[in-house]
Image (cartoon, rainbow, N blue to C red):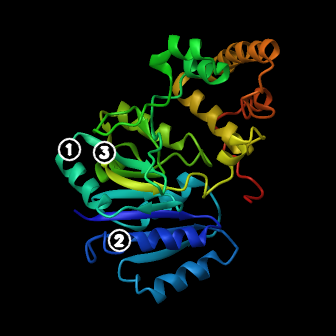
Amino acid sequence: MHLAIVIINYKTPKLVIDCLNSLTGEIEVGVDSVVVVDNASSDGSVEQIQQAITDNKWSEWAQLLPSPVNGGFSAGNNLGIKALTADAYLLLNSDTIVRPGAISSLRKAIQANPEAGLISPRLEWPDGTPQISCFRYHSLVSEVIDAAQTGVITKLLKSYDMPIPVSDTPIEPQWTSFACVLIRREVIEQIGLMDEGYFMYYDDVDYCRTASNAGWKVLHWPEARVVHLRGGSGKVKEAIAARKRPRAYLYASRTRYFTKFYGPVGVLIANLFWLAGRAISLGRELVGNKEPHTCEYTAQDNWMNWRNPMKAPLIPETNK
């Protein structure tokens, strides 16, 4: 089985080099290949990564592909996929470290499970603490749960709650994080490349949902383990954790997703459901003097692109 590994870089050269180093001895040289797509970093990333490939003699299996523009996560991965011909493609975030044996385990999983079109490993912190990386779909009802953040509501609507608890045995989630995911070539041939209408976020759930609708299963394979330095390749999660205003492309992606899978009025309904949940959490904040859990301007930003949800991706002027 020929495996192609695609790593996207945007101003994270040191992380990419660490990721490449973790692949040493894990891939089959002469069979597998790696491409690092640089999304127009303009910070010296190309020179640093190319120097590391040369100095460490990785050029036998790794190459660097500079993109003239930063089209986002989907566009970058699509460039890498199109650059290599393989039986399966492993998409890796730059902020990942592949544990010993992870790739051989994923290879075993895809060969033993022909009905699985996408397979993800267990993501964990450097100390081995597992991260939740499998989920139920973003749905209209999950918007209520997300905005309410109230135990009674979450329990009542449990079957719609997005996060799936960490499992030590294989499971079939509705979607999985694309921080690390193995995609069978036949899936790409059937449903196409990733939707470049997303700059970042919601692209992974979109692709999993599209593959599932085409008859493929999503498989989580926890025997394979990959360290994920969550947030190392972007600032959105950092902003969310601090309840600050995230980048606008997060909300543009949300609008695109709900339109694609819930129809022309999908965003309207999703936002009404979110507001219903927010009314619950706001009441708890007023009565119980609790700190707000939502980010700044979320009620306003949820309407991003709602008049033209399927237009070209909202690319930020800067990606600090």
Q: Are marks 2 and 1 in contact (CB under 8 Å)?
A: no
User: Residue type at mark 3?
Assistant: Trp
Q: Which residue is mark 2?
A: 33
The crowd level at tag 3 (other Cα within 10 Å; few <14, some 14-19, many 20+) is many
Q: Callout 1 environment at 10 Å: few (<14), some (14 to 19), or many (20+)?
A: few
Residue 114 badge = 1
Which residue shows up at 28% across the image and 62% down it? 101
| Near-viewer residue (126 or 180) | 126
Task: Please give left or right for residue 32 compared with residue 179 in the image.
Answer: left
Amino acid found under the numbered disc labelled 2: Ser
What is the secondary structure assignment of the residue under circle 2? Answer: strand
Alpha carbon distance from label 2 to label 1: 22 Å
User: Seen from this angle, which residue lies furthest left?
Assistant: 112
Q: Which mark is residue 240?
A: none
Label 3: which residue? 221
Residue 71 in the image: above or below residue 300: below
Of the numbered discs 2 and 3, the one sitting upstream in the chain is 2
Of the residues under marks 1 and 3, which one precedes in the sequence?
1
Discs 2, 3 touching: Cβ within 8 Å: no
Select label 1 or label 3 by which is in front: 3
63 on left or right of 291: left
- Looking at marks 2 and 1 on the same chain, the residue that comes earlier in the sequence is marked by 2
Taking the image as drawn, is residue 119 in sight? yes
**Residue beneath the point at 70% across and 52% down:** 315
Q: CA distance from mark 2 to mark 3?
A: 22 Å
* Image position of 279 with respect to 62: above or below: above
The reply, left or right, for residue 85 in relation to residue 143 is left
Front one among 18 and 80: 18
At which x and y percent is residue 53? 47, 82
